[in-house]
Image: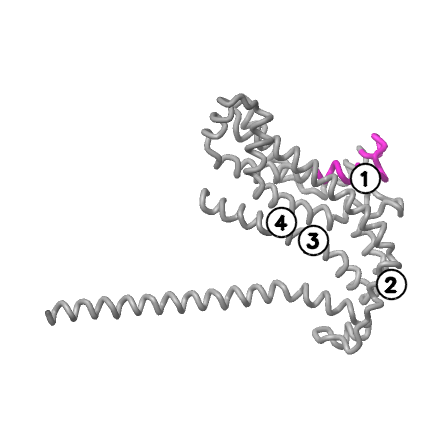
């Protein structure tokens, strides 16, 4: 009995020790994640408090709260850069590009994931090659092409290149997610008389919502913040996008930092809203990819 009691007590102390180690490791992990979150969110916090400062305070008190909150910075930034028109143009370009990217990407991913044909590997290789092309190296050829087809200074001058360069990434993300779906659901749908279009619309598309949400937020950030194509392809003030309007506060001689920060704070709000809307689906896509890998 004494020997058995000694063994049981040894096992109990060992389990308590391992439990304590797990708690310490969990605590250290939580603290590390908290520090990482604070470091990641601090630039956003600094942007918003800087938007309420004067230019003098921006340099003299860069990491402190403003002495007097300058709410007028937002009104002046909105009026000086004509952000209302610029934001409307960005919304039109972003929504149109996003819709085309999701529809074309989902259709192409469905074909590459569920069908077998001779040139499948070649097509996938072409899309992979599209991911390797530096976007800004195509500015001059695209400008010449847009000029010949008379698309400069139009929404299509931005929509078409945006979609073309985002499609390879969208296709690979959605295709990898569709590859995890079992074939049984398609066979059952075909037995019930559902065609390929019905399978795509009623089964594959709803199941791919987490992957499509991930593509949507990544594409939205690219389209919303893109500057180079808009600068080269758009010269009419009535068609300028939000990044072009933000550049008005900086010249070759000086930068109005208080208005720049206020304008940046306004422009970042839509990206935060979009992330909050798609956050649940993005997390589902990440978890599903990790489990089904």
Q: Residue at x 54, y 66 (%)?
A: 34
195 vs 75, nearest the viewer: 195
* Sequence-first tag of 1 and 4: 1
| Contact flag, marks 2 and 3 (Cβ < 8 Å) | no
Q: CA distance from mark 2 to mark 3?
A: 22 Å
Q: CA distance from mark 2 to mark 1?
A: 27 Å
Label 3, on which residue? 271
**Residue 17 versus residue 268 in the image, above or below:** below
Front position among marks 2 and 1: 2
Q: Which label number is shown at residue 155? A: 1
Callout 4 secondary element: helix
Front position among marks 3 and 4: 4
Q: Which label number is shown at residue 76? A: 2
Q: CA distance from mark 3 to mark 4?
A: 11 Å
226 vs 45, nearest the viewer: 45
Label 4, on which residue? 278
Return the x and y of residue 149 as percentages of the image width and height: 83, 30
**Residue 261 versus residue 167 in the image, above or below:** below
Q: CA distance from mark 1 to mark 4?
A: 26 Å
| SS majority, magenta | helix
Callout 2 secondary element: helix
Q: Is 250 contained in the magenta span?
A: no
């Amino acid at each position: 009995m004494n020997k058995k009691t000694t063994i049981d007590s040894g096992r109990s102390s060992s389990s308590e020790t391992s439990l304590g180690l797990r708690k310490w490791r969990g605590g250290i992990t939580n603290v590390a994640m908290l520090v990482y979150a604070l470091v990641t969110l601090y630039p956003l916090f600094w942007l918003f408090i800087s938007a309420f400062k004067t230019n003098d305070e921006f340099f003299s008190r860069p990491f402190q709260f403003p002495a007097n909150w300058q709410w007028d910075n937002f009104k002046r930034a909105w009026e000086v850069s004509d952000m209302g028109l610029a934001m409307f143009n960005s919304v039109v370009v972003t929504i149109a590009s996003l819709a085309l990217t999701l529809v074309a990407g989902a259709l192409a991913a469905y074909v590459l994931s569920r069908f077998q044909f001779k040139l499948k590997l070649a097509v996938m290789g072409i899309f992979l090659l599209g991911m390797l092309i530096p976007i800004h190296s195509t500015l001059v050829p695209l400008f010449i092409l847009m000029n010949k087809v008379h698309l400069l200074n139009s929404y299509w001058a931005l929509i078409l290149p945006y979609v073309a360069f985002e499609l390879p990434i969208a296709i690979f993300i959605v295709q990898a997610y569709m590859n995890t779906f079992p074939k049984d659901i398609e066979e059952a749908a075909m037995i019930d008389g559902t065609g390929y279009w019905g399978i795509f619309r009623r089964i594959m598309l709803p199941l791919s919502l987490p992957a499509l949400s991930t593509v949507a937020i990544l594409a939205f950030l690219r389209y919303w913040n893109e500057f180079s194509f808009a600068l080269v392809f758009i010269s009419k003030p009535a068609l300028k996008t939000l990044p072009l309007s933000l550049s008005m506060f900086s010249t070759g001689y000086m930068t109005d930092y208080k208005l720049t920060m206020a304008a940046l704070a306004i422009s970042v709000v839509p990206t935060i809203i979009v992330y909050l809307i798609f956050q649940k689906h993005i997390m589902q896509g990440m978890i599903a990819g990790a489990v089904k890998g």
